[in-house]
Image (spheres, rainbow, N blue to C red):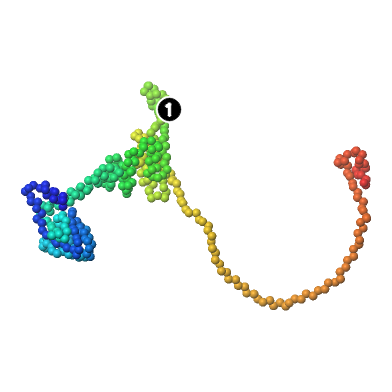
Amino acid sequence: MKLTQKLLGLLHRVFDPDPERFLALRLSYAGSMTWAVSNAVLTTTVTGGPGQSLTIDLTAYTLRQLVNYLSEQPGYDVLSAGNAEQLSLGARVLIDATGDIANSNGDHLYGYTSLAWAFLEPAAVELRAARKQIPEAIKQLSIGTASDDWLDELGSYYGVGRFQGESDGSYGPRIIAEVVRPRSNNVAIEAAISYYTGQKTTVTDVVVYGDIFPKYNGAVTRNSAYNYQSTAQPRYGLFDVEYGYDLLGDDNPTDFAGMVEAIIDKLRAAGTHLRALSLKSGAITDTFTEPVDGAMTIVASPILEDLLTAPTENEVELVSSLAAMADSLEAPNDDTTGTIVYSYRYNSVRTRNGAINYMGGQTGPL
């Protein structure tokens, strides 16, 4: 409302700035109470009594609805209100003011009926909202604080579009990373693909050789226009890319390859070209908790039962007698000694040195 009054002060003098106010209502409370109306919000502060302080958004009520609402609150009482035509107006026609019911006329809340006020009040609301947006507008000028469509706009300045479903928290830092990211050589492209895909990538510079030209076969004459030599010309500026692919991921291999090609096209240097794009299986890992063999308690309650048939055999009695046993031994004769005869064969074990007599290949008794 203060801004509305300021706008009214800017009107040409031909316009009447008077609010053409009317007594909207008289508000009382069973205790002490002060109230304030500011920017379409009614606030009451009470002390004692059965009720509580209130904060009411006036844009949600007509004057009649506001009167009914206040009358229903514990301790509050609306002593009087405007006529039927006035009560049909929106409650935001209440003029900004403060009051204390302990003072004279401190319970009076006034509204306006001026068309000038009715015209300038919505303009003041929009201007207040625009003023609050000034700090937000400044934020939208920086990638670090911009959001939504403004961040998309900033990204378009650098040729970095938002991925499908990418959040502001991811897209903003990626714009900066794209701008300052190393590029052009195979190491930079390798790092970028690995960063975006999370897969190990290898980028290899290659040199290929074209057909030997010119050939000395009559098609080209020896007229000094061509050098007569058979060396093939190397072709530089080509590179091969081998990247991983998560077999357990949700990406389609064709779409995934297209994304990798787009990254390469952004980072490659002018005059260099992708020769081959190869997909290799990414690493598949699985983690699990090893089983732990703890103590196992086995509770068993076996029931043992055996049914025996009583024996019916009679008792067996063994009757035996030992006969007389005798043995006679002949006393040994230790004096008898046998003659031991040794026989020797002449088989070169013994020499003929006179110690053994040579008698037909044998020796006599010793």
Image quarter of residue 360: top right
x, y percentage for residue 207? 41, 33
x, y percentage for residue 356? 91, 41
**What residue is drawn where x is 17% and y is 63%?**
28
User: Viewed as shown, does residue 141 lie left or right of 323?
Assistant: left
Q: Nearer the viewer, residue 15 or 325?
A: 15
**What residue is drawn where x is 90% and y is 38%?**
353
Q: Nearer the viewer, residue 245 or 336?
A: 336
x, y percentage for residue 261? 36, 41
Position of 326 relative to 20 (above/below): below
Position of 169 relative to 237 (above/below): below
The residue identified by callout 1 is: 231
**Residue located farthest toward the left when viewing the structure as drawn:** 14
Image quarter of residue 84: bottom left
**Label 1, residues with CA under 10 Å away: few <14, some 14-19, many ≥20:** few
**SS category of the residue bearing label 1:** loop
Amino acid type, callout 1: Thr
